[in-house]
Amino acid sequence: MASRPIPSRQVHLDFHTSEHIPAVGSRFDPKQFQEALQVARVNQINVFAKCHHSWSYYPTRIGKRHPTLQIDLLGQQIAACHEIGVQAPIYFTVGWSATEAEEHPEWCVRHRDGRIAVTQWDFEAPAEAPRPPFSWKFLCPSGDYRALILAQTEELCQLYPVDGFWYDINCLYPLCYCENCRRGMAQEGIDLDDPEAVCRFNVRKWKQFFQECTRVIRSYHPEASLFFNGTTQLGGRRNEEFRMYEYNTKQDLEDLPTTWGGYDKLPLRAKFFHLTGQPLVAMSGKFHTSWGEFGGFKPPEAMRYEAAAMISFGAACNFGDQLHPLGEMDLETYRSIGHAYAYVEQIEDYGIGGRPVATLGLWRSGSEADDEGVARMLLETQTDFVVVDPDAEGWDHEAIILAGGPCLTSAQAERLNRYARAGGGLLVLGESALDASRQRFLLEVGADYLGPARYDVDYLVVGEALAAGLVRSPFLNYEPTLRTRPHPGTEVLATLREPYFSRTYGRYCSHQNTPYRPETADHPGALRRGNVVFLPQALGRLYYTHGARVHRDLFSNALRLIHRNPMIRVHLPSAGRVSLLHQPQHHRYVAHLLYGPPLQRGRCLVIEDLVPLYNVRLEVRLPVEVSRIYLVPTQEPLAAEKTEGTFTVIVPEVRCHQAVVLEYGTGAGIGAA
């Protein structure tokens, strides 16, 4: 049964509260709570039923009520929200529950050797020793612990008008070998020394848990939203491979860009999860660092940039906060959120639910460094892209990038080979042409695979086709190039110089890497066969790790050989971002332009100065006749030049964010301005 539409301006209200703090909730005032939400222009807030300390914040008969809680905090929060038309899904912890882990060690996740699985934990530390952030024991949703969660879920469904459930810390990893899991695996005849079989058992265990929670909730509240956090992380391929997210009614993309990998994690994840067809919610925080930070504040302008970015990539917005144990909302926090959400109100209809469109597809490898490195190069050059759906019946992309790392089945490789033979362009990076055993090429790249590199680094010398803007001297690859033998007729686009030797204790030169030999290596550095370009370097990983401009320029030059017809062109500084969304129900395309350069300060990325850009030239090539072009939020019309399906406008100013709407319909189209 369908869930309600996803609210656009959300808050996730953390409330992990120690039993050593007195008078919990004593200053909660429904009116002050409502005032904060109204100041922030919030239309949904996730409120806590049970936290990581194991405490519940309502009069539970199933779980453990917080020992100093004097009111039904959850019930009063839900009632206060509903009184002003705000939805209030219920938060419930699963994988971290501290008191229950201490009282029931048999409920904990166990490693193969029987040790309890933990994060940031020192079992030898005395009670008075400082405790590091994010230090918890993992719990396994099996046996009595699973029964407890399901019973408490049912209790909550009976007590309250439920808008949704937000289950936290749902962990496929670490794999569990607790007694419940061992019994289950023994019944299925699983060898505990077979990590793949153990992994698949853990997948079934978690998905059965998701299914049971869904069944309970749906029996009482058929339209409630459901989300199991942890299922939308994309490190490795397991969440994607096993579709761990399939019980979610929306996909919440938890991302704190200041400390969790930067501002370019969201675009790639959003583009992937758009493939699920579910609504997206982008989650950040008001914190300077990350969750659990009392008294940390992100500048309001940074929050406005983040919120605009969320809308630009087709997602609703959610900012995390943490409620003080006494229950009083911090109005300064909600004024900052309100600054962002006042802008979101003006632009949300032009982004949320929009479908990314591009003629360039990115085939994810499942390697975070490879995938995010390639995505960063594309984002920094304003080269818009979509994530390829490997299971789609057909691909209409002009070109596809394979990001690196063996990631193809034989059937997928054959589909890509047919795609290339039919005229589609392929840019193949690193090992992505190889089979899983790294023995041979599955993709037709115009060469035979000879093996891995002989040295620890090498140096690339580009030919004319790749030379634009690049140095013609040999430049360093921090990881070496695969060795290949080109087939007759394959064009060599770049050659290699190998070092005199790898850097070792026995032989070394200078501070870092050995210089190159004067002669050209016997294997090439880049190849082209028809419309397949092969760069045997792990360029995505190189850029993710080292960020060298020469590698980004090499990548862009290679891509231009096969990707000549992007749907959108715009020249912005490297911190500029572009996203083209299609909203067919509204008969419009929306080009979102963003500019907010982040600065590295300590361990945090900070956005502070939103410097305007003026007279930005934007070209959008569309398959429809456009009838009207205008700016959002001002609704100011833009004059356009039209040439062979491409509409060119000059955007007067981009300050943080600017959307350009191109409407189409049955009316007369735009001619030459």
Image (cartoon, rainbow, N blue to C red):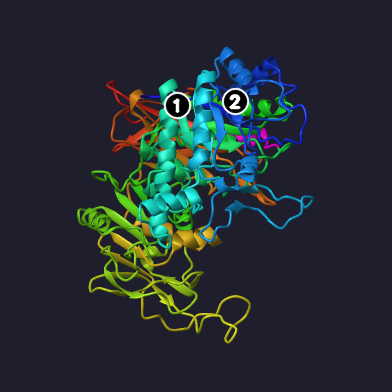
Q: How many marks?
A: 2
Kindly state the secondary structure of the residue where label 2 is placed. loop
Q: Position of residue 464 (x, y in %)?
A: 37, 67
| Lower sequence index among marks 2 and 1 | 2
User: Is residue 25 shown to the viewer in this render?
Assistant: yes
Kind of residue sitting beneath label 2: Arg
Residue at screen point 57% across, 53% down: 117
**Is 296 placed above or below 172 here?**
above
Residue at screen point 37% across, 38% down: 276
From the image, tell me which residue sits under label 1: 217
Q: Position of residue 5 (x, y in %)?
A: 43, 23
User: Is residue 651 shown to the viewer in this render?
Assistant: no
- Residue 19 occupies which quadrant of the picture? top right
Kindly state the secondary structure of the residue where label 1 is placed. helix
- Circle number at residue 432: none
Kind of residue sitting beneath label 1: Ile
Q: Quadrant of the N terminus?
A: top left
Q: Residue furthest right?
A: 128
State yes or no: residue 301 in magenta.
yes
From the image, tell me which residue sits under label 2: 61
State yes or no: residue 215 in magenta.
no
Residue at screen point 56% across, 48% down: 106
Q: Position of residue 432 (x, y in %)?
A: 36, 61
The label nearer to you, 2 versus 1, is 2
Q: Which residues are magenta?
A: 297-304
418 vs 503, left or right, is: left
Name the one closer to the observer, 262 or 559: 262
Q: Quadrant of the C terminus?
A: top left
